[in-house]
Image (cartoon, rainbow, N blue to C red):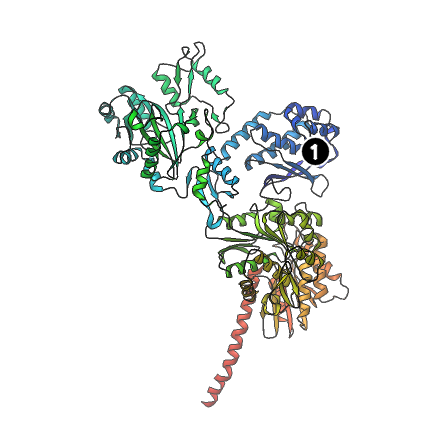
Amino acid sequence: MKILEIRALRGPNYWSNRRHYLIAMKVDLEEMEHYPSNTINGFTERLVNLIPSLFEHRCSRGYEGGFIERLNEGTWMGHIIEHVALELQVLAGMQCGFGRTRGYGKEGVYNVIFSYEEEKAGRYAADAAFTIVEAMISSQPYDIEKDIQKLRQIREEERFGPSTASIVEEAKKRNIPIMRLNEYSLVQLGWGIHQQRIQATMTGRTSSIGLEIASDKEETKNILYNNGCPVPYGLVVYNAEEVEATVLKVGFPVVIKPVDGHQGKGATININNKEDALRAFEAAQNYSDGVIIEKYIQGNDYRLLIIDNKFIAAARRIPAHVTGDGKSTINELIQEVNKDPRRGFGHEKMLTEIKVDKMTQRLLDQENYTVESILPEGEAFFLKTTANLSTGGISEDVTETVHSTNIFIAERASKFIDLDICGIDVIAPNLTEPIDETGGAIIEVNGAPGFRMHLSPTKGQPKNVAKPVLDMLFPTGNSGRIPIISVTGTNGKTTTTRLIAHILRTNGQKVGTTTTDGIYIQNNLLYRGDCSGPESARFVLRDPTVDYAVLETARGGIVRAGLGYDLSDVGVVTNVASDHLGLHGIQTMEQMTRVKSVVAENIHKHGYAVLNADDDNVFAMLENITCQAALFSMVSTNPRILKHCRKGGAAAVYEDGKIILRKGEWSIPVDKVINIPLTYSGKAAFQIQNVLAACLAAFVKGVDVEEIRISLQTFVPTPAQLPGRMNVFTFEKYTVMIDYAHNSAGMEAMGKFIESLAFEHSTAIIAGTGDRRDQDLKDYSRMAAEYFDELIIWEDREYARGRDSTEVMNLILEGAKSIPEKTNIQIILDEDEAVDHAMKKALPNSVICIFTGRIEAMTSKISMHKEKELDLNISKEDIPNIGLLTDEK
């Protein structure tokens, strides 16, 4: 067996609209295709002994033990790899339960699909599951624990911390889209101009000055003290010589901590002698040159969470500690505490395991203890000087008991420090009384405070502290979305996408557009090339200047990685043809239709699927959509259109040379096609289809019909506005047209269009793309031969895509020769030479159609030819005048 490919899907996809995060493995079972599980002696027993929890897998049977039954009856290795990959992730603490294994279309080759929480973990699980199955086949021992531990490690490294995760989950509840912007905790909430950003519990609105102040504990204390907030007396020192005098001035007991420390790192509390003070100073200087020595305030450690300058929650924090039983060592007591099922590795559970570190060792030294010391019964020994949950501390929610004066003090302090989200650390006997009356004080103000103690307190009720963050960032309750119009289909995608974008720009929108020729932000080309996949869509949605996204959504991106968004407002499907069959396991028209339908099936329920009623495959998508439908047709009397409109539906039709919009019984003329440059006075029927789709998409989104009309009249298929789509260059004796038609359906449409123009002679310059099926290549050239008087075939090495380019060229030649009467066929291996030859031999009133993927290069080439002709004509006009001057002289 071998793994041929591992891909990660990150959006709605071919396999599932709801489960966006899937690993897709392409596995070749090779000889194991002939050996299902029940034919391998001892295989099932070995696998179940290694992973007993596989018994819980229901599989298609729908009950526990169902998968084991399948193993005993005989199932294929791809299916088994799927289940093992899922269970590995579950054993590592990740919730993964969706899987599918389907044939790829070649004997022994399978698509193995399974869900993941963290992409790196999913990829690791894919490789590990494959290796495990191989080991079970060959009866080799396998250490599964190393895989589980590795997956736990990956999970902790990759997943959001509890604070970020809480905000992300709250955003999902509100249907606010999420985009992770780096490997850490930088997250975009919302799209385009409505986006907000967070990084842990900092937001795009968090004051950098406020963070700077909060990170300087001395500056924070000075500001609070000068404005009447209770803070402990203290001084800053920079060298060990200052420590003795300072602690005497402040007075024991003291706290020593770094000026710009965080999470309690380098801090030591309740210091009562000079020697401990010097040791604490050295520990603090590991984190900061400046060290604060301040009065130790007796009392409990509290955290008050302030969001948008409003009190949200309060927790009492207790450092990690153990209580002696008179017989167990400190190390044994720690191990016992860590057995608490609420404690886990990192942030995987409510509480974190306690570890012995330098801070613990320092506290042990102070009491002349070691980890092997036996604590007297009932004696509590604190293992940390700070109460952070990340070091094993615990918390108790006390939100409901906080005195109103303390709320006032905390909210006021947050405004002085100027932080939208902050944690006010208070030491006081309690919070039920005003801290300025009980000797309590604010000891720190923390920017980017952790939420974990409030989300999962050890005692008391959890608080949804992420809610006020979202209320602050999205105060009107909006979802932070911008409208998305997504366009798919076999032919016409780019033109329809560009026309919709043009209509919206004319209507005053700031549009981001993805197409097969590039990414455009407000009509500025930022990336050149095929940008019709999910990453390009995300590029647009990340842009803070965009208020509308129009996305060309090609088959390849859907199959390889899913959609780049979750739901659109309008999904347009132009048509479905056989082009690209045989790629990525898509072998049939039914499967291709399923790929395209991903766009139609992932639309907001109040949005619209704009579907071609003349295409049976597209029209059939109506059965599975959950949104509203709008139909377009080249035939105004199409029964599907008439039935749809009788029910009050929206439609666009071509009738008596006009583009007509319909809504129920109402008909709204948009314009005559002779006024729409894209249709070439109605001669380009396929462009009329594209116009219908674009008009209907704009109409259902509320664009005024007059705006649509103006947009249609100003959208011209020039290289600037629509590169590579029917770009016409008129020369003195002949015409050149550049187009991207690359399949038989597109070639047929272009052939009919050229026929309608009544040129005396037509030439097509064509080549083949290597990733197409043999029959597709032959159909493409056969169609060209059927409509054009002359063919020039060239060898496209750039788009051979792993295939012998000569073989591809010969298939194109074979298809062209299948038209018996077609004898005017030439082979010129280089495209530039082929074009030069055709232009040199061009007959009067002829047309040369260049069908190419090298649109920019070919446009530049033809433009240069045009400029030379213009220069030559200018020179010819000047020559007679020069001659007259000479004669007169």
> 828 left or right of 568?
right
Q: How many marks?
A: 1
Q: Is residue 787 above or below residue 191?
A: below
Quadrant where the N terminus lies? Answer: top right
Q: Nearer the viewer, residue 873 or 168?
A: 168
Query: Which residue does the image show at 55% across and 29% down from the upper left?
Result: 93
Residue 369 picture quarter: top left
Q: Position of residue 882 (x, y in %)?
A: 48, 84
> 683 left or right of 339?
right
Q: Is residue 845 visible?
A: yes
Q: Position of residue 316 (x, y in %)?
A: 40, 26
Q: Nearer the viewer, residue 483 or 843?
A: 483
Query: Which residue does the image show at 56% across and 31% down from the upper left?
Result: 94
Q: Nearer the viewer, residue 393 or 663?
A: 663
Quadrant where the C terminus lies? Answer: bottom left
Q: Position of residue 610 (x, y in %)?
A: 62, 54
- In the picture of the structure, the residue carrying the numbered disc 1 is 60
Q: Is residue 671 above or below residue 332?
A: below
| Residue at the extreme bottom | 888
Query: Which residue does the image show at 53% across and 79% down from the upper left?
Result: 876
Q: Is residue 834 above or below residue 586?
A: below
Residue 829 picture quarter: bottom right
Q: Secondary structure at mark 1?
A: helix
Disc 1 marks a residue whose amino acid type is Ser
Q: Is residue 853 visible?
A: no
| Residue at the extreme top | 327
| Residue at the extreme right | 820
Few, some or many C-alpha atoms within 10 Å of disc 1 (few <14, some 14-19, many ≥20)?
Answer: few
